């Protein structure tokens, strides 16, 4: 086949490069969403640990003070 | 204990920067410096995207096989993770290879797909072969068996991939453009240089995305393990 003129070839070349860019962007967006989920889970775990530490501290305090401290 | 997340994430930012700069440079060379090819004209610019992407994709499949082999040899789960990520990423890039190839075929040959062209069909066969990887992997529940079976698949399929390259050389019907037929690829210096820089850019991009996904996966695995540990400790404390 003879070479396509620039105006017709340009569309195909642009489409190919845009497909590549699109695939990479979709992939990065999916990965970013997953990382966002990991960050949310870390925040959740942080809160969970705080609650647990507080509960442990309260339990220790009541053990040291004894059940009839008041 | 070594923090795998940190190990995989090391140098990621620098790698991403290098990949971006190299690819931008390569694409700038493609459109502003490299001359149009005499036979195909402007449409040949797809070559600098499609061919390096295809080579890196097939290289990724082979790398997945090598990591699979390491998993079988050492039994370490980290090799399984590396193999899985390499194959997963290559599969995604293979979609881009197939689409850009179809666009180039339509512009050059007037057809989106040519079934009697060995290069296209063998690439499609490789793609379909690896498309079975994930269903096979996740059909197995036991993590040990999953890693072992996935590694065997990766090794066998990885060994099959070079046949794809061999097919290009042995094919009789030279309808697909032969790009690296001689040591210089039969290309003028400027075209060859642009191709090599594009190849380097694609390789860096693959490595960046591979490291990125590996870091993300390691972080998730670590998080799950911490979650399990906390749940276990909480249960023990409650029981006490």
Image: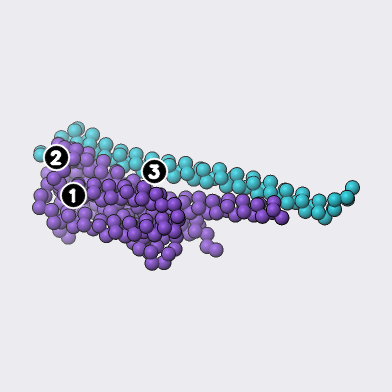
Chain colours: A cyan, B purple
Determine which residue is flagged by label 2.
B109
Give above or below for B232 relative to B74: above
Place of residue B42 in the rendered image (x, y in percent of width and height, measured from the top left): 19, 40
B162 horizontally vs B173: left or right: right
- The Cα atoms of the two marked residues, 3 and 1, are separated by 26 Å
Q: Chain of mark 2?
A: B
Q: Residues within 10 Å of mark 2 (few under 14, many from 20)?
A: some
The extreme bottom residue here reads B73
Question: Image quarter for residue B78?
Answer: bottom left
**Which residue carries the number 3 mark?**
A27
Using the image as rendered, state which of residue A43 and residue B228 is in the foreground.
Answer: B228
Q: Find numbered disc 1 in the image and state the secondary structure of the residue it sits on.
A: helix
Q: Are there few (<14), some (14-19), or many (20+) residues within 10 Å of tag 3?
A: some
| Residue occupying the point 17% across, 54% down | B168
Say whether disc 2 or disc 1 marks the residue closer to the N-terminus. 2
Quadrant of image for the C terminus of chain B: bottom right
Q: Is residue B201 left or right of residue B46?
A: right
Do the dots labelled 2 and 3 sit on one chain?
Answer: no
Residue positioned 55% across, 54% down in the render = B225
C-alpha distance separating marks 2 and 1? 14 Å
* Quarter assignment of residue B147: bottom left
Secondary element under disc 2, as helix, strand or loop, is helix
Nearer to me, B43 or A54: A54
The reply to whether the C-beta atoms of the residues labelled 2 and 3 are less than 8 Å apart is no
Q: Horizontally, is B239 left or right of A68 in the view?
A: left
Q: Nearer the viewer, residue A52 or B207?
A: A52
* Residue at left offset 62%, top offset 54%: B232
Q: Which residue is mark 1?
A: B119
């Amino acid at each position: 086949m003879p070479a396509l003129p620039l105006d017709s070839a340009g569309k195909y070349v642009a489409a190919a490069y845009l497909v590549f860019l699109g695939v990479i962007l979709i992939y990065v967006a999916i990965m970013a969403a997953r990382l966002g989920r990991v960050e949310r889970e870390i925040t959740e775990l942080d809160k969970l640990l705080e609650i647990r530490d507080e509960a442990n501290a309260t339990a220790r305090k009541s053990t040291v003070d004894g059940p009839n401290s008041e | 204990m070594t923090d795998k997340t940190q190990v995989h994430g090391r140098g990621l930012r620098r790698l991403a920067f290098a990949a971006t700069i190299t690819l931008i440079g390569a694409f700038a060379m493609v459109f502003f410096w490299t001359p149009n090819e005499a036979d195909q004209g402007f449409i040949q610019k797809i070559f600098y995207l499609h061919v390096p992407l295809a080579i890196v994709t097939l290289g990724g499949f082979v790398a997945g096989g090598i990591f699979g082999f390491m998993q079988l040899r050492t039994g370490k789960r980290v090799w399984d993770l590396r193999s899985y990520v390499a194959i997963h990423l290559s599969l995604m890039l293979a979609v881009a290879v197939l689409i850009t190839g179809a666009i180039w075929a339509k512009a050059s040959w007037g057809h989106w797909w040519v079934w009697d062209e060995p290069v296209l069909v063998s690439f499609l066969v490789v793609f379909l072969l690896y498309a079975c990887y994930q269903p096979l992997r996740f059909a197995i529940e036991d993590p040990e068996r999953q890693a072992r079976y996935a590694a065997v698949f990766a090794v066998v399929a990885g060994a099959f991939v070079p046949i794809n390259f061999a097919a290009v050389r042995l094919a009789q019907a030279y309808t697909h453009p032969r790009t690296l037929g001689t040591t210089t690829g039969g290309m003028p210096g400027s075209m060859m240089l642009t191709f090599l820089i594009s190849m380097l850019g694609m390789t860096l991009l693959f490595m960046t995305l591979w490291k990125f996904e590996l870091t993300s996966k390691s972080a998730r695995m670590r998080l799950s393990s911490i979650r399990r540990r906390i749940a276990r400790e909480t249960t023990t404390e409650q029981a006490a």
